[in-house]
Amino acid sequence: MRFARSIGVLVAAALAATGTARAEQVVKIGVAISLTGPAAVYGATQKAGVLAAVDHVNKSGMLKGVKLEAVIEDDASTKEQGIAVFQRFINKDKVAAIIGPTLSNTATAADPLAQAAKVPVVAVSNTAPKGITDIGDYIWRVSLTEFQVIVPALQRMQAKLGFKTAALLYGNDDAFTQAGYAVMKASLEHTGIKIVGTQTFAKPDRDYNAQITALKALHPDILMVSALAENAAGIVAQARQLGWNVPIWGGNGFNAPAFIKNAGPAAEGVYVGTAWNKVSPDKVNQDYLAEMKARGVDPDQFCTQAYVGVLAIADAIKLEGGKGTREAIKAGFAKVKDLPTPLGLFSFLPNRDGSHPPSLQQVQGGKFQIVQ
Amino acid sequence: MWDQLADLYATYQSTIAFIGINSLLALSVYTTLSCGQLALGNAGFSAIGAYAAALLTMQAHWPFPLAILAAVAVPAVVAVPLGLPVLRIRGIFLAIATIGFGEVVRLGLVNWDYVNGAQGIVAIPQKTELWMIYLAVAAALFVLARLRGSKWGFALEAIREDEPAARTMGIATTRYKLAMLVLGAALAGLAGGFEAHFTFMVAPNGFGFGRVVDMLVYAVVGGSQIYWGPVVGAAFLTLLPEILREVAPLVGIEPGPLRLLVNGLVLLAVILFLPNGMVSLPRRIAEWRAARVAARSAA
């Protein structure tokens, strides 16, 4: 009898506990990123960014009565698993919003599922200009497209160096570098710079001497390269070995510490456009850097964009009066304007792409430095 | 109750579809293996089927069933002129030549601007239904089952065991081998057509060398001695990563490389302990049991 009563007390206590817990609304965010496979380099830092941002939002108390919870799954850099993860988030975990996937190719396969199920998606690393946000009104993007990064940076650089002609070299067997090339070409045409020559290579290539020699003979004022980090170092090193001291501009793939490490001294002077000004003295950015340092993370652009992805979701919930439903978050995104983030003041454009000031950086003394 | 079942189905819908698609791909490798030929051009055939179907529905506005028929027919037609010369070479040389074909297809697509090169075709309408995929798997299994014990089946087996001997017995080996290559190409193309209209996009990098290795692994892990073995392998290997996704949090594994490691270990265990594939598991258990009984009676 006493036993039964104590069970009754326990049950009552448990009910009371869930009762108080229910007062706090938990908003689940599905995070579909590549933790294995070719894009794992980016996925690992994206994970760190998301976890830091969720802690930041929950501790700051900016969302009263709402607790964010990240559900992280690996898409193995494949569209097959990307789709499986999205269906899981939508139907099993019932998340309020999805961040990811890491690769644009996976996004074109998985995002339509979220659009059909009316689950808002925030892309934090897809930079392909077409085929992402035009999937539908539930697909939003924090990561700047390459066009948004390259054009302002190119104009600033042209004002500085006054060049008139350019040569292009790009990897044509990779979706990311091919899209980067298309944007470089459009940006050059937009800025009125003449393209004197174009050469291509493939991802497995390790010898670029033929392409570089052909381009060198055309004497362009600048060489623009769209390559993944694994190819970038070899291209830059071989160009310098051939005694070619032309200014080199690297695409988004150069935005990796691995590039500087592998290219060594040859990397000196290379220009890369970037979405994130790491050394920005802005207080939000400095606080973010301190926060990441405390967590033992050395943040890069991808980490920061993932962080801002969570901030955008939190802001959308706040703007909708603390409602964390799928519809509320989607409606809230449209109102996100001049949100202070480590990337600068962030807004969503009417076409659901993100907008914030990009920067131009140059390798100096074995580090990326912002060109003012 | 029904809601939960519906959620469960919605959650694993894509996995179920991919089990079917991967089964078709595994069977496409099995067709040539059944006559002893290691032909590995199937990723290329699959790409041709996928691109043909996607272009026909999106550019030419063909109805989906016709586009799927084209996904079967185009790679099958391509297989004939490819097969006539390459089937004269055997073993590892045939494997290399057909891998070369697959790479030619992939690089051709990468350099073809009309289909967006490496970025592939996107925003393909989703038209593939689960029943279509499984109807195709059932049909393929039916054909392969009927082959066994038929004149054709015996001829294929003879070629697999000893090709020169089969030729001396009057079997037109080239014709049989070519027919199986064409059948394999048709199955791979069909899988490609289904995949293109299921995943909203196709890109050349999805049809690289790694993909054909996957197909071969499905067939070998499942068991390449019997026609339904590849389907077992495809089902098991497609499910495994998703099952591990379910199990991982229960044992405290964070999402990431560890899941891949366990995946590899399970694969290794199957290859080591079941060299004839998963279909040999019941027989292996019977053998172990018999050995134990024998040991006990000896003692």
Image (tube, rainbow, N blue to C red):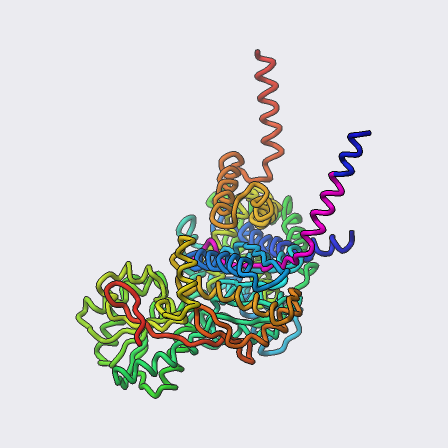
Pick whichever, A119 or B114, lies toward us.
A119
Give how far across and how far down residue A323 sits, in percent.
66, 66
Give how far across and how far down residue A111 sits, in percent.
58, 67
Residue B242 visible at all: yes
Residue under the point 20% across and 68% down: A240
Give the quadrant of residue A229: bottom left
Residue A96 magenta-highlighted: no
Left-right relation of B77 to B110: right
Residue A37 magenta-highlighted: yes
Quadrant into which the C terminus of chain B falls: top right
Give how far across and how far down residue A305 sits, in percent.
46, 66
Pick whichever, B163 or B46, lies toward us.
B46
What number of labels is visible? 0
Residue under the point 31% across and 75% down: A224
Give the quadrant of residue B189: bottom right
In the image, farthest residue toward the bottom: A192
Residue under the point 46% across and 56% down: A48
Left-right relation of A136 to A301: right
In the image, farthest residue toward the right: A1
Give how far across and how far down residue A33 sits, in percent.
51, 58
Left-right relation of A341 to B238: left
Numbered range of the magenta stretch: A10-38
Pick whichever, A332 or A354, lies toward us.
A332
Residue B127 visible at all: no
Give the quadrant of residue B154: top right
Pick whichever, A216 or B232, lies toward us.
A216
